[in-house]
Image (spheres, rainbow, N blue to C red):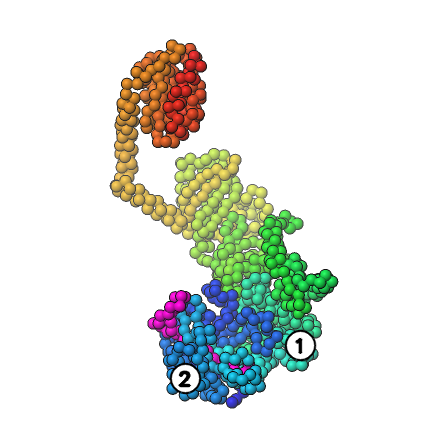
Amino acid sequence: MKNYGVNELRKMFLEFFESKDHLKMNSFSLVPHNDNSLLIINSGMAPLKPYFTGQEIPPRNRVTTCQKCIRTGDIENVGKTARHGTFFEMLGNFSFGDYFKTEAIHWSWEFLTEVVGLEADRLYPSVYEEDDEAFEIWNKEIGIAPERIFRMGKADNFWEHGAGPCGPCSEIYYDRGEKYGCGEPGCTVGCECDRYMEIWNNVFTQFNSDGKGNYTELIQKNIDTGMGLERLAVAVQNVDSIFDIDTLQAVRNEVCKLANAQYGMILKTDVSIRLITDHIRSVTFMVSDGIMPSNEGRGYVLRRLLRRAARHGRLLGIEGKFLSKLCSTVITESKDGYPELEDKKEFIFKVLTEEEEKFNNTIDQGLSILAELQEAMSEKGEKVLSGADAFKLYDTYGFPLDLTREILEEKGISIDEDGFKSAMNEQRQMARNARKTTNYMGADETVYDDIDSSVTSEFDGYNKLELESVISVLTSETEIVQGLSDGDVGTIIVDKTPFYATMGGQEGDTGFIVSADGTFEVSDTIKLKGGKIGHVGKVTQGMIKSGDKVTLEVCTAKRLDTNKNHSATHLLQKALRMVLGTHVEQAGSYVSTDRLRFDFTHFQSLTLDEIAKVEDIVNENIMKALPVVTDVMDLDEAKKTGAMALFGEKYTDKVRVVKMGEFSTELCGGTHVANTSTIMLFKIVSETGIAAGVRRIEALTGNGVINYYKDIENKLHEASKAAKTEPIQLIKKITSMNEEIKALQSENEKLRNKIAKESLGDVLADVQEIKGVKFLATKLADVDMNSLRTLGDQLKDKISSGVILLASSQGNDKVNIIAMATDDVIAKGAHAGNLIKGIASIVGGGGGGRPNMAQAGGKNAAGIDEMLSKASEVLALQL
């Protein structure tokens, strides 16, 4: 058997399956795309899940890949054993409803025995214990003796993950020889020792599980095959572990050279050498795929691996920064399969160097503090580091909890992790409470304060909406970074940009920034201190790096609509001065894609006639197709042209003058149309007061006006439909309906009064006499206040002299009360208002009024009888 290298084996595998009509696809990024279930790609099939689930149509029904993968589940064992690693390459061949078990098994055997040349008598297949079909293929078609085929249970040979597609597996084991065995009698496939190594796994996705133990056959059966490239290389190269295969051995040897150490002599030294070898490979590939160091998510995984490697370098006695040197070896060994490593070499070096430097600046002090804490604990006989101390190391010295745990475990010390979490949560709450902290200038502190003051941006977008530039600075939401990857939010600063930043009342541009490796969607453009322009947004695809050459593309439609609204504000200001007077001054403005807002000095609301005149003047000058000319000149020269300036605004010596024909001349730094006819239409939609002597107009232009009238037209048709008439007849119909409503209301009022009167019956028989004054107190059902007053007037006329008290309930929670008194009994002391005040509380109400008439409301109808009875006593006291 020929001793193939890792790069040769990768190429051989992919070419083999290409010969079987598979489409070779490049490795996907380690950053999952549209898959929130994964932090980092951890298997060959993970990026292909949309093809397996049917969410996306694969480019071909047969696919082969060599996928970069990272798994950190066993990170604590990396280095301590010779077989654990975080980064690996997964070779895979996949079928989406095409071939199935027969082809998959035959091809796996053909590749291993005929292409690679592994001895057939050292290969042992396994099948799921109930999969007779796979057993028969291995036995009768491949020719493997039954005793060499191992039936295994669900735990080993059935792939499923909750509900969904699942199926049996067929693995292939390689016998590495007795020297790797445990020496126990019966040591065979399935033993936990290192003799029988699984190198290939065929997954036959043929069932759908309901998650409750019930399985149904899939109509479309799939093949998901995986083989670890490093494990294959171990078998082919006949070496002890993955750290001895050619590509990793080269990195391992470089570690030994830097540390002046020999591998295989001292266990503790070997642990550090293996850990650094593995971790530097992982971080090199992670950074090349756009993962940046941070304190959360995949960025934290990267930072953790980097700092573990840096610390173990110190344990080996390596002085200074060394990670980028090792990284160079990783790139040299792997660039055949991953040419992007070479393309991004300088960027990877920069990221690793900066991160290692950050850690080196704190690690010595942190290690010293940790040593002091250990000494103090030893004196007290304690074996648990407090959460507060662990958090101090994390927050102040940049020690991840994992690193502190790893160092202490070597000394048999654990950490109060609940206390650590509590301290972390307390710090986060304090940070939230302190977000309003300002710097010495009184402005909110931001990540932009850390940008070098020499960095500036040039705006070159008056006549361009696309240009090429270079990224000078990248920031995340919290820090300056070297790169942003898929899904990251941040800010890009370039040397030259066509994007207009929000200022002068004009909304910032949106659009895209595109590099060779990624796309960044700009959601806002902002003006920063020192002449910097920040493009705020999110990476939507790939990766964006500091120093990248990029193409900046402004959203054309939005910019053009903004231009229309901005130019219209100039026409509006001149029109307002013509209609209202020269006292009109601009007091503020805001223009965006969908409307304009203009604040101005004026002391009363505009009449409809004034609004119409302003609109007419603006639209007239739009239709005149005035050329819009801009010129940059000295401020004094600009003033001589009669250009309008904003009151209180500070201008530089050089200013930009925007002239629209002979109609309007203003100082303005914003973007505009080239001709007023582009504005198309102008419509004021509101005019309000916002402060003493300051008014605000909101208006629309162009398509905004068209859409405004379309909306009105739609509402007109809806109103016409509701009125059961045509739009042209709507006013006539509404007038007719109002007259009809008025007549019905009058008729209804008469009916209510008649019903109320009839409900009284012969109440005059209930008239009492209190101290020589007639008093009529009675209740009615469901009579409103207006009808109650009418009845009161009628009864007062009938008794000619006396006091009337009427109460009516409308439901259980509403009471209407009215009291009236004639002039002659008022002279005797009667007072309708005081009578109401004295009794209304009984029904849960209140009220009052004049001596001759008063009214009240209440909430408790059940108290009406008691109230009427009480009224006699109250009136008697008045007389």
The C terminus lies in quadrant = top left
Q: Which mark is residue 138?
A: 2
Residue at the image point whose x is 65% and y is 72% from the top: 312
Relative depth, front residue between 74 and 642: 74
Which residue is at a point 67% across and 76% down the rendered structure image?
269
The amino acid type found where label 2 is placed reads Trp
Q: Which mark is residue 269?
A: 1
643 drawn magenta: no
* x, y percent for residue 837: 44, 21
771 is higher (above) or lower (below) than 503: above
Quarter of the image where one finds residue 137: bottom left
Residue located 32% across and 28% down the image: 782
Q: Secondary structure at mark 1?
A: helix
Q: Helix or strand or loop: what does disc 2 sit on?
A: helix
The one nearer the camera, 216 or 455, is: 216
The residue segment tinted magenta is 194-223
Residue type, numbered disc 1: Thr
Kindly identify which numbered label has been placed on residue 371: none
465 lies left or right of 240? left
Residue 761 visible within the image: yes
The CA span between labels 1 and 2 is: 45 Å
Left or right placement of residue 358 versus residue 696 in this view: right
